[in-house]
Image (tube, rainbow, N blue to C red):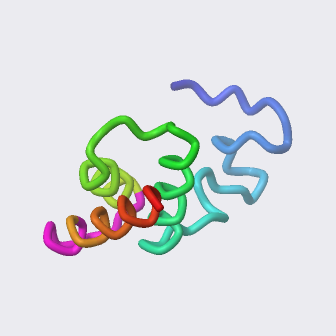
Amino acid sequence: MTDTGDGANDPFDGNDQMVAGTGHHETPETIAEDVRHDIQLGQVQDDVAHVLEERFEEAGIDARPEEVDDLAEEIERDASS
């Protein structure tokens, strides 16, 4: 990808003191809440544990498979009630 340097808010332009991807730090709690919300909106069609694993990986969060499965079960119970 080529940095064109267009605009003061260009996240790829190192001259404007901005860094792409900063500002919002995901935690297991915020990810779980987002997944609950997405389920309620009907936006999650996959296995909840799989969705959690993907989102944890994207956020750089390491979690044991058992923890992910337990959290997925809790989210599914909450979303179905």
Q: How many marks?
A: 0
Q: Residue furthest front?
A: 81
Left or right for 69, reference 26: left
Task: From the top left corner, tell me how far across and down residue 31 is, in percent.
Answer: 47, 63
Q: Quadrant of residue 70?
A: bottom left
Q: Quadrant of residue 8?
A: top right
Q: Residue at x 47, y 55 (%)?
A: 35
Task: From the top left corner, tell me how far across and down residue 78 is, in percent.
Answer: 44, 66
Q: Nearer the viewer, residue 53 or 75?
A: 75
Q: Nearer the viewer, residue 47 or 1?
A: 47
Left or right for 3, reference 63: right
User: Is 51 in the magenta?
Assistant: no
Q: Nearer the viewer, residue 61 or 32?
A: 32
Q: Residue at x 14, y 72 (%)?
A: 66
Q: Is residue 70 above or below residue 56?
A: below
Task: From the top left corner, tell me how far across and down residue 68 is, in percent.
Answer: 24, 67
Q: Residue at x 43, y 56 (%)?
A: 80
Q: Quadrant of residue 2?
A: top right
Task: From the top left corner, tell me how far across and down residue 55 is, in percent.
Answer: 38, 54
Q: Nearer the viewer, residue 22 or 55?
A: 55
Q: What residue span does the magenta drawing correspond to?
A: 59-68
Q: Is residue 39 above or below residue 34?
A: above
Q: Residue at x 33, y 56 (%)?
A: 52
Q: Residue furthest right?
A: 8
